[in-house]
Image (spheres, rainbow, N blue to C red):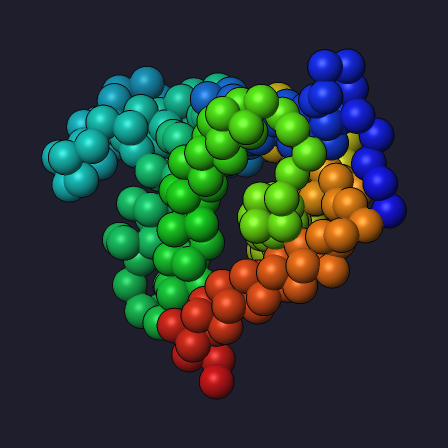
Amino acid sequence: MSETQAPAGASLMAVLALFGSLAIVAAFFLPWIGMTDDVRRELNLSRPDLERMEREIKAQTGDERAGRAMRLLLDGGSPNGLDWVALLGFVVRRADDEALAPRERRVFEVSLDALRALPWVAGGLALLLLLLRLRPMAAPLLACLFAVGLVLGGLGGLLWLGASQKAKEAAGQGELLGLGLKLMAGGGGAVFLASLFGVRAENWWKAYLLGLLLVAGMATAAVLYIGAV
């Protein structure tokens, strides 16, 4: 198992991993999900209502991002990834036990922690790849790329399972998904493929074993925190 190399000794899979990591970082600064016109019409909120809601959220959290994200969403826009993370964090903190059971709250908390860490991890991987001059990747780096790809796939699965049927239909028609989520999906796929095909004959088993152990460790920690066992 030998990966193809680009000119000057660079690894094509390392280049693919670099672009995938940078795409994940960039995705957090681009629009993620909007709101359908039907839902917005049902809410029937005026501009003064939106401004009041934005001020209340800012006063409660001390963070402008969540309030700005809520106003943008209800005003017909599509918040970026950082705004969505802030907004979801606000909603989870404000929800009472009747609206959100303790176990469900912990599921959201774990997912939000993963989302908060993701751009930092992807940025660190991109920096490491550049420092290594895009040379063929060692097993620990391949394992980290493998784990990032699987975590992204898991978060996407949770988002899809938690979405309503109308939201799924709208997403299937391209009405809700912004460029940020599409770029993240592409970046996650690129990182995962790089981890699978960037191995060499002498390190493929180490890379896959380390990757599986890393994912299993994170999954076990998450399950124990959520209280599923």
Residue at 48% from the left image edge and 85% from the top image edge? 229
Image location of residue 64, percent across then percent down? 23, 27
Left or right: 110, with 51 as reference point: right
Image location of residue 166, percent across then percent down? 67, 44
Up-down relation of residue 27 to residue 212 (above or below): above
In the depicted view, which residue is nearer to us: 196 or 158?
Answer: 196
- Asked if residue 131 can be seen in this view, the reply is yes
In the depicted view, which residue is nearer to us: 203 or 125?
Answer: 203
Left or right: 103, with 166 as reference point: left
Image location of residue 8, percent across then percent down? 72, 14
- Asked if residue 37 can be seen in this view, the reply is no
Residue at 84% from the left image edge and 30% from the top image edge? 4
Residue at 45% from the left image edge and 39% from the top image edge? 121
Left or right: 6, with 20 as reference point: right
In the depicted view, which residue is nearer to us: 97 or 223?
Answer: 223
Left or right: 6, with 17 as reference point: right
Image location of residue 44, percent across then percent down? 43, 29
